[in-house]
Each structure stands twice: as C-alpha cells, then as structure tokens.
Amino acid sequence: MVVARKTKGAESKKDVARRNGPPAGTGALASLGIFGWRAMEPVVVAALATEEPVLLIGPHGTAKSLLLNRLAGALGLRHRHYNASLLNFDDLVGYPVPSDDRTQLVYVPTASSIWDVESVLIDEISRCRVDLQNKLFPIIHERVVQGLELPKLRFRWAAMNPPALPESGEEEEEGVDVYRGSEPLDPALADRFPFVLEAPDFRTMTETERRAVIGGTSDEVQPDAAARLRLEVETVRRLLPAVRASLCEAACDYVGALLPLLEKMQRKISPRRARYLHDAVIAVHAARVCVDASCDPGESAYLALRCGLPQPAIGRALDSGKVLAAHRQAWALARLPQSDLTRLVLSEPDPVRRVGLGLRVGLGATDLSTFVLDAYAELAPAKRVMFAAALYPVVSTKVNLTATAFEVIAEVQKRIEHPGERKFSPIQGSRRTELLREIQHELVGLKKESVADRTLYNALLVAFERDDGDFVPASILTWFRELVELFGWGREALS
C-alpha cells in the first residue's frame, strides 16, 4: 500500500525558530507579497544568483507557483509557465516540418514555445508522463532540447506536490493529504535540481505572516520590490568569488564528512549532488552575508543541506533530527575560516560598486571611507557630482564615514542643495548650448515639487558646470539611477 506520512524527527523550538525566521514584513520575498518563506530566502536568492535549477515541493495552495512567477516578473524575464500534467512535447518545441531543402526537420514555433524564453516553470512535474519527464532532463540540466541549445534560457524551475511515500507497513495518517496523482520523480531527474525546497507549513508561520496571507496582503507587491530583488541578486553574484575563496576548503571538508553519514542514514547521494552541496554552501552563505555580515557559516551550511537533498522528491522521507545531527558532526570536522569583510569587498574590481558592496555587508567606517575616497578620485568631475548626490542620503542618515570622507561628499551636496545664482552665457550653436537643450529635454518630466526631483535637477546642473568634455545628460542620468539602486536606500532617503 502506498501511504504518506510526516517527516520523522520532531524539531526542537530552537530548530523551529531557526527555520521560521523573523516575522513578516521584511525581506525581498515579503516585498513581493510572498510570506512565510523568509527562512529559505537566502536559498532562493542563491539559486537566482547562480542560475541553478530549483524544485519546490509542497501541498496545494502554498504559493509555489506564485513565488516562481513573481520572481520571473521582478527580474523582467521572458517567462513560460507550463503545466506538466497537460503538457505535450509539441507545446515546448512547436511543430516539426521539413526544411526548405528537405534535408532535415525544423520546428515551427508557437506562442508557447520554449526557444526564446529566459525562464521556465514546469509545474506539476510529478504528474508528468514518464516519456515526457525523460525529455525534460536535458532542458533542466543542459539547457538543450532535441539536441539544440537554448542560449537564452537561464532559469529552470519546477514545482510539485509531495509524492506518496512508497514505504509499507504504516497506516495512512489522519489529516495528512495524500496526493495519489503525484508520483515520485525518477532519481536521476530529481538529481538535476541542486536546490530542492519544501514549502513552509502554514502552521509554523508567524502570526503576522498568517494574517498577511489570510488578509490578502500577499496580493500586494511593493513598488521597490523588483529593484530590491535585483540589487540583492547582483550583490550576491559579486560576493561569490571572495566567499568561494574563503569557504571552499571548509565546504569540501564538510561535504566529504557528510557522505558517510548520509550513507549511514540510507540517504546516499551521487558525486554530482556532493558537488551541488559544496557550491550551495558557498552560494547560500554569500546570500546570508549580503543581509548579515556577521552570519555564521555553519548555519549557512545547514540551510544549504536542508534545501539540497533530493530525497523528498523521490518519495523518501528525511529525518530532520538525523540530518541536523549529521550536519553538526560534519561541520565540526570542517576547517572553519573567519570571513574577512574587507577582503570580500576588495574582490569587486569596480570602485563604485565596491562602495555599494561595502554598504550592503556593513563594512566599518574606516574601510568604507577608504573605498568612497578611492571611487571619488577615479571618477570624472561630472560623475563625482552624481556619485555624491546618490551617496549623501545614505551616509548622512544611516552609515558613518570618517570626517575626511564625509566632508568630500558633503561639500558637493552643499553645492547641490544651495545652488545660488547660476549664470550661463552660452554661444549659439556651441556644444554647451546643445548640452543645455539636452538637459532641459531630460528634465522635462521633473516638476521639482519633491526633494528627489529638486536634488536630481540641481545635481545635473552642478554636473554640467563641471563638464570635462565627456558629459552626456541621458547617460549620466541613467548612471545616477543605477547608483541610487546600488546604494540600496538612496531612493527612500530622497523621497
């Protein structure tokens, strides 16, 4: 008899608190209207930063599809959402017809074809026909279909209900949903997903999170949600090389120590999965450092392990108590390095982005000030103005700089806030006359009624005053907006 049962091994209150995370209302996913997932948010961000396949497992109504579709929307991806239980292969590739020269078959794409998409969600993958599952292997693992590359495809996501567990000798537990149409995935297919996340249990959410879901707050997406997610993903990507250099040996030791422990639990993993776990420890830690510079690498490793084992997808329960014990034993054997935040930030080659990274990881005032002065010194005069204008709201209210660094930024800001009388005597047909026209064109939408509009208007005029011959208003405005996003809360401080 095929039955479903709960995961073995009751978690302690401390483990539940670790898994559940802080209350709703904060985090990139909460800003997208996704509540209850905060504990797994570093895994989601790590998967986005590394562009590795993700499989979500959970009961119906737990926001699996909503989460993945909103991530695609926030990242501005060309996206396809397929229901695997209804999917035919022609839906993916189009219809085969002979080529003009009759030497081969070519595919005529349809509105649902996969050829030009950047992200794909294969929903209900556990209800998919076996023959079609086999055709999904290369799409998920290699970004290839019918031997043809999908060069634009970056993100491969899938979702499913929990499969019935093929373990006999137990009765069906009352109150536990049994998804008889949800079959265990082929182990080889499940092993193609580096990240396997189980949706949070509604009962373990905080009261605030439950009320947000029940009350419909999950229908609301905050205005800055997309920019916030993109910034976090980009920051993690830039942190990855330094975190990898710092944690690589420890992660190798950790996964190596895990292998016999998992085998003892009868949850043996493949060499591919061992590599996935190693990389996941690094990526998840980078995502956590992005939010909390002092986070414990051991906690990152445990989170990567819990969201990196394929057994839940193939119908084999995980004993959470044994997984935690295996983690503790393996981590004790790993060589634990101390993260050097300055070294992490120095791994970023671009001096301006280095400042943004320093802000994100909470770098100390002395080191951050050095990076600010270095970036300022390397910029052209006009760009220095926009750099200071974007940075000042942050360093004046939320972050400390040394007196020297703050004075440099504040001096520019003083000129922006108190422009005084400006007299331009352009010569008809001159370059500066053309620049003024371009500036007026770019600022036509600014009503100068808000602090943000006045700051931007005055900053552009000050930058024009400092023109060094390479001043393009449209480009420098675009760069300013990128800086505001890079520095995290610049737009909030200006509004």
Image (cartoon, rainbow, N blue to C red):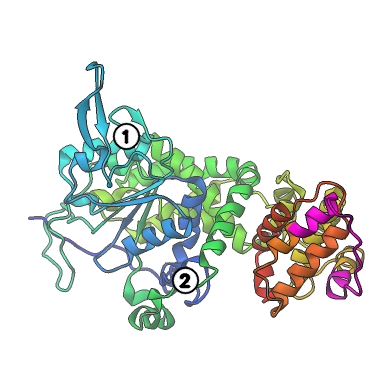
Q: Which of marks 1 and 2 is nearer the N terminus?
A: 2
Question: Callout 1 environment at 10 Å: few (<14), some (14 to 19), or many (20+)?
Answer: some
Residue behind mark 1: 138
Q: Is 445 situated above or below 469?
A: below
Q: For residue 397: magenta? A: no
Q: Which mark is residue 30?
A: 2
Rendered position, 211 above or below 162: below
Amino acid type assigned to the residue bearing label 1 in the image = Pro
Indicate the position of residue 339 as horizontal and vertical percent values.
68, 52
Relative to 383, is 340 on the left or the right? left
Q: Is mark 2 on a helix, strand or loop?
A: helix
Q: Residue 36 — which label?
A: none
> Mark 1 and mark 2: span between their CA atoms?
33 Å
Q: Where is residue 427 in the image (x, y as percent from the top left)?
A: 89, 55
The residue closer to the viewer here, 287 or 78, is: 78
Query: Which residue appears at 87% of the width and 66% of the height?
Result: 412
Q: In this orientation, does residue 328 appear?
A: no
Residue 453 against residue 43 in the figure, above or below: below
Report the span colored magenta: 413-437
Marks 1,2: beta carbons within 8 A: no
> Farthest residue toward the front?
428
Inspect the image, locate mark 2, and give the three-letter code of the amino acid beneath it.
Answer: Ala
Secondary structure, mark 1, is helix
* Residue 266 visible within the image: yes
